[in-house]
Amino acid sequence: MDGRELVEEGGVYDLRVNAKGARGEGIGRIGNLVIFVSNAKTRIGNSYKVKVTKIHRTFAYAEISGAMREIIGNGSQLEF
């Protein structure tokens, strides 16, 4: 399963940002599908509700859709 079966355009998903791209986009994964989140305000380690806008063969683009959840020092999640 490469992740494309798990994701559809227009769908909203929880995504944890694991890296930052050269242009400031957040990068995460759903299955093996790499998701680029076009928002310079994403932070590594935080989870976001994202809406997938375009799917390609091995990657997809998304935008922030809803509340952000930040992991704090003791492993708890805060919703904003």
Image (cartoon, rainbow, N blue to C red):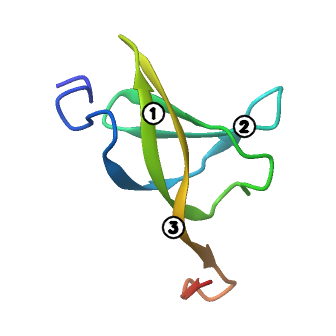
User: Under tag 2, what secondary structure?
Assistant: loop
Residue at image point 32% right, 33% down: 9
| Residue that label 1 marks | 53
Amino acid type of the residue that numbered disc 1 sits on in the rendered structure:
Thr
| Residue that label 2 marks | 25
Amino acid type of the residue that numbered disc 2 sits on in the rendered structure:
Glu
Residue 63, picture quadrant? top right
User: Under tag 3, what secondary structure?
Assistant: strand
| Residue that label 3 marks | 66
How far apart marks 1 and 3 lie (CA) works out to 14 Å
- For label 3, count other residues whose C-alpha is less than 10 Å away and answer few (under 14), some (14-19) or many (20+): some
- For label 2, count other residues whose C-alpha is less than 10 Å away and answer few (under 14), some (14-19) or many (20+): many
- For label 1, count other residues whose C-alpha is less than 10 Å away and answer few (under 14), some (14-19) or many (20+): some
Q: In which quarter of the image is the N terminus?
A: top left
Mark nearest the camera among 3 and 2 is 3
Residue at image point 25% right, 26% down: 4
- Asked whether, in this view, residue 23 is left or right of residue 39, the answer is right
Pick out the residue farthest to the top.
Answer: 57
Could you say which is closer to the camera, residue 62 or residue 45? 62
Residue at image point 43% right, 25% down: 54
Residue at image point 63% right, 75% down: 70
The percent coordinates of residue 68 (x first, y second) are 58, 71
